[in-house]
Amino acid sequence: VLLIDLDLNSCGDVQQLLGLREVKSLVEIAPYVDRLDPNLLRGFITPHQSGLGVMQLYRDKADLAKINAELFEKVLDLLSRIFDFIVIDGGAVLNNTLVKGLERSSIIFLLTTPDLMVLNQTRIMVDELQRLHFPKEMLKVILNAYEPRSVISLEMVTQKRQRQILTTVVRDDALVRQAAISAAPFVLSQPRRMLTRTYDAFVRNLLERRILDRLAVLQ
């Protein structure tokens, strides 16, 4: 599995959360674009102790001009020969590079929270993706930081989104805060916590129901 931090505004968060001293970027790959191959590309992937590979958009935002959507498209095509699964953290802002990544994706997860303003922004993002001709079947909403006793119920969220929620992640601020401070993913350090079991069930559901395989034909 490869995780690519493609967040235009907050690139580097993945590195911090995983406790990695250094993560190479697409900027560093750019000078080699004409002779890229899977073997050369492996040298730009930072391994995490969990077995996860990590790459990011940039180290210094001032270098963004060195990257374009065509470069990322070529890199992504080569990465797909190396990894079974590629997860892109695209942040909350669409740009040409991110759109290239989404065009090669089997599924798009839209993370939202039970907050009226956030739900409205999620609706705007869904509308924009559909204007870009991404099939609605690809767009899956995940409700994060949900509190069962919240005044905003699941029914309200579903009505606001006008689509079903793929999965619900219950809020656990203490666990998430500790994981961020210690730079240790809670799915590894706290395997029995409810939040971890939710993530495990979510991934198992994707694989056992072959959701990714069925959606791949929509690309």
Image: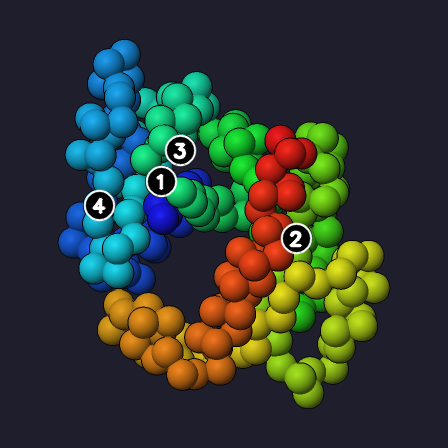
Give the side of residue 149 with respect to residue 106, left or right.
right
Determine which residue is flagged by label 1.
83
Image vertical order of residue 177 relative to residue 81, above or below:
below
Q: Do the residues labelled 2 and 3 touch (CB within 8 Å)?
A: no
**Nearer the N terminus, badge 2 or badge 1?**
1
**Nearer the N terminus, badge 4 or badge 3?**
4
Image vertical order of residue 59 relative to residue 26, above or below:
below
Give the side of residue 162 with respect to residue 187, left or right.
right
Quadrant (top left, top right, bottom left, bottom right) of the C terminus:
top right
Determine which residue is flagged by label 2.
140
Provide residue 123's location: percent of width, then percent of height. 73, 51
Q: Which of 216 and 47 is in front in this view?
A: 216
Q: Nearer the viewer, residue 51 or 146?
A: 51
Determine which residue is flagged by label 3.
80
Q: What residue type is labelled 1?
A: Phe
Marks 4/2: CA distance? 29 Å
- Tell me, for residue 46, which label it has, or none: 4
Residue drawn at x 24%, y 14% is 35
Image vertical order of residue 139 relative to residue 31, above or below:
below
Provide residue 192's location: percent of width, then percent of height. 40, 83
